[in-house]
Amino acid sequence: MNVGCPRKAKVSSIRRTLWLVCVATTVAPAVSTRAEDQAPAWATGCISVARESFTKESRVPEGYDRSEIQKLLFPEAMVVRDGRVEVPWLLFVKPWRASPGLSVAVLETVTYEKGQGRFDYATTLYLAVFAGGTSGAKADIRARGQVDSVPERYLRELDLAPYRLARDKLAFGVRTFMNWPLVGGGGQNEYLLLFVQDGQALKKVWATLMGSWRMSNDGYNDDGSSNKAEEGHEGTAVVSVLKTATGGFRDLRKSGWSKRPVVYRWNGERYVAKDRDPVENVNGWPEAEVEAEVE
């Protein structure tokens, strides 16, 4: 069964240029009245941009109470501690059709820290599987999870394809990406993270590189035009759940675009492969390996 979502990757939308527009502007006070939760002056511009993104770009279907779900995942409107400010950035919610009666939510927060003449930031993902949350029914959280803060990592989408790993283990995916500006172009990596419910916790069982692409200026032609150098592929790998199993979990096959597919098997903790990943990381910076956990 193929459950991947192949499509052309897009490089950085307007909301992904947050670091370019974090200028000091005046914003309303935080909802919390505690002194430690008041926005520091250096962060007001960044917080304003994050709140605008949350309002305009969160993806919550009609009928869900966005405010209620956000508070369940991140109760404070803003958290200030140790010179850092963490605020909600995006909220994605989807009904989990493969598991009737349940929905999945992922909240992305952004944490700012004032650096040496610039604003450093990273994102954290808060996840939940819940029942209710629509038609006035209060959301009932069944399981929670968290992906710790990673610099330059951004949420792309929820992937609720039917990743049936075992008879009683249905996984769901979260897709993220990292991108970097380059002279004459840019670079981007896309990742897939799979989670299963383990009691009241959501456990990450696989994190894998799904796409890697870059374009940069590789000099100039005789007519003065730039010579663009492109590597990788703008497509996305495809993941298939196989009928074979290892350690009680179905094997996973990942197909890239230029190499033979590779099978990943359960080792009791997470999925690993003996063969080289079929998706080549053409960007190669250390940050690009953070989510992939490639053996």
Image (tube, rainbow, N blue to C red):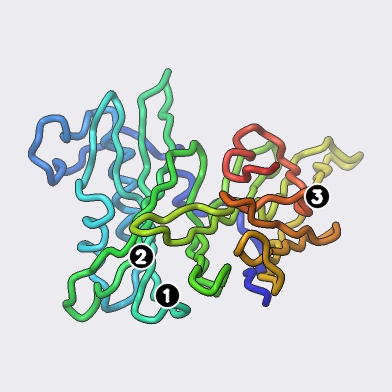
**Residue 253, position in %: x, y?**
72, 64
Q: Residue at x 42, y 61 (%)?
A: 197
Tag 3–tag 1 contact (CB < 8 Å): no
The image quadrant that residue 202 belongs to is bottom left
Image position of 220 (left or right of 110): right
Upstream in sequence: badge 3 or badge 1: 1
Q: Which residue is mark 2?
A: 129
**Residue 95, position in %: x, y?**
39, 75
Q: Residue at x 31, y 64 (%)?
A: 142
Q: Residue at x 37, y 37 (%)?
A: 22
Judging depth in this view, the residue of 174 and 248 nearest the camera is 248
Bin the neighbour count of mark 1 within 10 Å (Cα to Cα): few under 14, some 14-19, many 20 and up: many
Residue 208 versus residue 25 in the image, above or below: below
Number of labels in the image equals 3
Residue 218 versus residue 92 in the image, above or below: above
Q: State how far apart marks 1 and 2 are (Cα).
A: 9 Å
Amino acid at the residue labelled 1: Trp
Q: Which residue is mark 3?
A: 275
Upstream in sequence: badge 1 or badge 2: 1
Bin the neighbour count of mark 3 within 10 Å (Cα to Cα): few under 14, some 14-19, many 20 and up: few
Tag 1–tag 2 contact (CB < 8 Å): yes
Q: Which residue is mark 1?
A: 96
Secondary element type, mark 2: strand
Amino acid at the residue labelled 2: Val
The image quadrant that residue 254 belongs to is bottom right
Secondary element type, mark 1: loop
Q: State how far apart marks 3 and 1 are (Cα).
A: 32 Å
Mark in front: 3 vs 1: 3
Which quarter shows the C terminus? top right
Upstream in sequence: badge 2 or badge 3: 2
Judging depth in this view, the residue of 116 and 131 nearest the camera is 131
Amino acid at the residue labelled 3: Asp
